[in-house]
Amino acid sequence: MLNTVAVNLRAIFRDRVFHGIVVVALLFLLIPSVSSLSMRQVTELSITLALSLLSLILLLLSISLGATSLWKDIERRYTYSVLSLPLSRSSYLVGKFVAVALFLLLATLVLGAVACCMIWLASGIYPADRPIVWMNLVLCIAADLLKYVMLVAYAFLFSTVSTSFFLPIFGTISVFLAGNASQQAYDYVHSPLAKTLSPVVKQAASFFYYLLPNFSAFNLRINAIYGIPLSMKAVVLPVMYFCIYTTLLVVLATVIFTRREMK
Amino acid sequence: MHAIEFDELSKVFQGKKKVTVNALNSLSLQVAQGEVFGFLGPNGAGKSTSIKILLGLIGSTAGTARIMGVDVTEKSARSDVGFLPENPSFYDFLTGEEYLRFVGKSFNMSAADISAGSSDVLKRLDLWEARKRPIRGYSKGMVQRLGLAQTLIHDPSVYVLDEPMSGLDPIGRALVKDIIRELKERGKTVFFSTHITADVEAVCDRVGVINKGVLLAVDTVSGVLERGVEGYTVRVLKPDGASEERVVAKADLQEFIEKSMAQRWAIERVEPKRKDMEAFFLEMVSPKQTSG
Ligand SMILES: Nc1ncnc2c1ncn2[C@@H]1O[C@H](COP(=O)(O)OP(=O)(O)O)[C@@H](O)[C@H]1O
Ligand SMILES: [Mg+2]
């Protein structure tokens, strides 16, 4: 499987997508000057901008890599030459997934470091009222990474049942949108405001709440921006949630892919 | 133990609009170890379908297949096999050399074996100059030759080649035939599909003819060629010095020779005139046209 991971990582590095993010990442360099324009809350603004940009890049990466990795292999008929090697379907798929996840980790490490440098520069220009809690910033970025790895697992699941890139790409985008909204929808349905809703709708909402991912659990941005202390629970629960949910998705994708015909 | 075994193998493809295609109909076939077997059939006969089942790329609707006694649904069935897909395509962001290393690692070869084996096969298949170039820039023939190289690098005992000669120029074709003969000499098993009868005649021990998913005949190549003797071309030298060539039916040869002797014609040469592999193939595949 290491072999599969290595070859897929190489595929990503030699892909055009990789060169695309390098260009987008240059936007990080603008953060200090843009934030200083606000004259107030420069540090807070720079943290917000840096985290948003990092999140956007990770989103683009997880959709473009996650949704096309398997599809490309099938489309370009690499699957015939690779799956006929003494390699199980599961190690092929899991290897691919690990490669994309590792690449996201690498991108996060590099871009996260750049982001922290820029925030540090910005805070030097206009010191904040509250000191930056770097640990919170790191945890916030790590939680974001977990969220996107989970999204990649969804993209893989869609890829295993689809013959085109349409379902993987749009399915993944839908999951992303739904995952960000699911907590709000759930809260709304269970609030006094929703009294008029029929019980069936509420049941359905709960069902989807538990089925769809809840990405708000991974949102530690407020803590990072305003240096608000993080509870142990706010860190451990998302990690556990991530582990269980992602494992289930990958196992399901593997089961489907093992049965798939390479026609 | 047979190198390759198909046992009552059937495959039904579920096409669009509930159209079903019986691509393979109860195929049973054994290929012995050390044998070069030609799987001969026209386009759409079911050759690639059988081969894809053999490599675990698709499942069978009914029946089983084994490589070296191991059921093809297990990945270990592929651990001693070199496979060349039809119109192959390889990770094109890698160079030829990198791809061979990837394949070598997949077969758990040591780094030393990989680098030695890789330079051997790259040179053998005339890819040495191109080894450091991305496969993306290879021509069709080069990709096909790389395909053969990646079956050879780990020196397996069974080779499954789907139309190995396609996409190659005459030099490449000759090279492939040479390689197959060499593998035979080294006791390897080669199972390859083709629609070209001359390729079968050139290198195979046995041939199986398949059409419309049905295996029509299995025979030794020499058997086909011997049974195919239809008559003889006899060259005689007449007393006046003139030489003449006559075509004599198989049954009439004895009589003709006696007659010639009586007339004091000298017989210079007797050559069996055979129906070749092509005629055998055409007869199998379209019996109505040739039997009349
Ligand atoms: N994925 C598929 N879906 C439907 N029919 C298929 C599929 N693959 C092959 N077939 C059909 O199965 C038959 C055998 O095809 P194939 O094994 O590729 O032939 P060959 O390799 O001998 O040229 C053909 O009629 C072909 O149209
Ligand atoms: Mg074919």
Image (cartoon, rainbow, N blue to C red):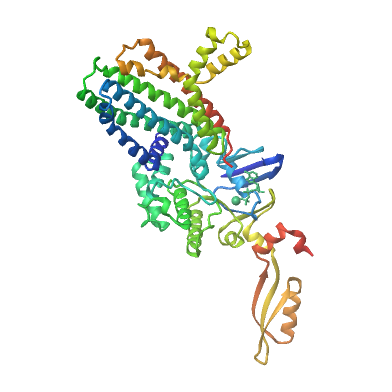
Residue A50: percent from the left, percent from the top? 32, 27
Residue B65: percent from the left, percent from the top? 61, 40
Of A168 and B31, nearer the camera is A168
Of A114 and A41, nearer the camera is A41
Residue B81: percent from the left, percent from the top? 50, 44
In this view, which residue lies farthest toward the right? Answer: B292
How many numbered dots are placed on residues in this image?
0
Of B204 and B198, nearer the camera is B198
Identify which residue is drawn at 53% across, 16% down. Answer: A209
Indicate whether A263 appears above or below B205.
above
In this view, which residue lies farthest toward the bottom? Answer: B240
Of A165 and B247, nearer the camera is A165
Identify which residue is drawn at 52% across, 20% down. Answer: A212
Residue A220: percent from the left, percent from the top? 37, 17
Indicate whether A96 appears above or below A237.
below
In this rendering, position of residue B66 left or right of residue B99: right
Identify which residue is drawn at 57% across, 60% down. Answer: B199
